[in-house]
Amino acid sequence: MTKITAIIPTLNEEIHVEDAIKSVDFANEIIVIDSYSTDNTVALAEKHNVKIIKRKFDDFSSQKNFAIEQAKYPWIYILDADERVTPEVKKEILEAVQNPKGYVGFYVHRSYYFAGKKIKYCGWQRDKVIRLFLKAHCTYRGVVHETIKTNGELGFFKNKINHFGYRSYNHYIGKIHHYSSLKAKELHKSGKKVTLFHLFIKPPFRFFMHYILRLGFLDGLAGLILSKALAYSVYVRFVKLWLLNNGLKEDEN
């Protein structure tokens, strides 16, 4: 029987980590790779039959690729701590590893929740990620919103996993600042310059895209708040890039 290693990257995920572990109980090995959490994440994970690896965070791809190198088994299932594998997807995973039909990995769509409300529009209706793959054929690339580079064909699961990415507005804003800092550093290294277009045109257009073009208004107040937050994420990214380009620190830490 072909075996699976499930990998869960964590940083201060005490609210999520146990449910995440339970949702991949089908895996033959579970690795929690932790970026030195300061809450109870590790203590809670230790209550379960998992392998815990502590590694200083540098970027998302490096963190995941390092964990993949430690995996015992050929099939990898990557699970963000705020995701849950549903019973329907679990069945598809187990069937896929036994009969992959020539695929080296599989996309799965996600049902997205914001502050406890299921978001049906705002662009999330098309949200999909590669989560199951053969480690010999796939590698993560990119600093933020990392992608998997493959040397083979990818399949699709029919069912969706649940993604509880943002349990509150403040939690979401915190993630925006974390991701924007990483992206700004990446853009700074590439020599990207900031113009008025980036600060005054791109953020409003991002709001228009998610709220109007991608039907966020159909999600009610949650859709409005989420679309505004997505626009803010663009603005703060380029503010931080401007600071870096001018030799200024984002903060004193």
Image: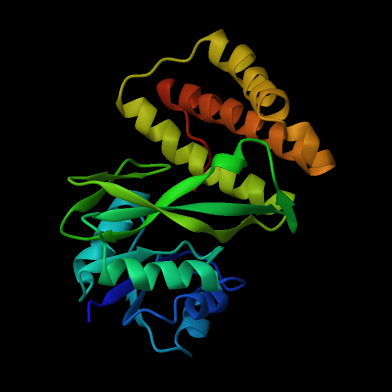
Q: Is residue 127 left or right of residue 228?
A: left
State the image coordinates of residue 219 (x, y, percent, origin top left): 78, 41
Q: Is residue 245 left or right of residue 119?
A: left
**Picture layout, residue 151 above or below residue 218:** below
The quadrant holding residue 200 is: top right
State the image coordinates of residue 227 (x, y, percent, origin top left): 70, 33
Hey, which residue is sitting farthest right in the picture? 221
State the image coordinates of residue 75 (x, y, percent, origin top left): 25, 67
Residue sitting at x 53%, y 40%? 251
Q: Is residue 65 left or right of residue 163?
A: left
Residue sitting at x 35%, y 65%? 77
Residue sitting at x 65%, y 31%? 232
> As rendered, which of 239 and 42 lies closer to the eye?
42
**Picture layout, residue 16 above or below residue 137:** below
| Residue 33 visible at all | no
Residue sitting at x 48%, y 77%? 21
Count of marks overlaid on the render: 0
Q: How is the image coloured?
A: rainbow
The quadrant holding residue 192 is: top left
**Picture layout, residue 135 above or below residue 203:** below
**Picture layout, residue 133 above or below residue 235:** below
- The image quadrant where one finds the N terminus is bottom left
> As rendered, which of 140 and 26 lies closer to the eye?
26
> As rendered, which of 48 and 248 lies closer to the eye?
48
The quadrant holding residue 162 is: bottom right
Q: Is residue 70 left or right of residue 180?
A: left
| Residue 64 visible at all | yes
State the image coordinates of residue 220 (x, y, percent, origin top left): 83, 40
Hey, which residue is sitting farthest top in the picture? 196
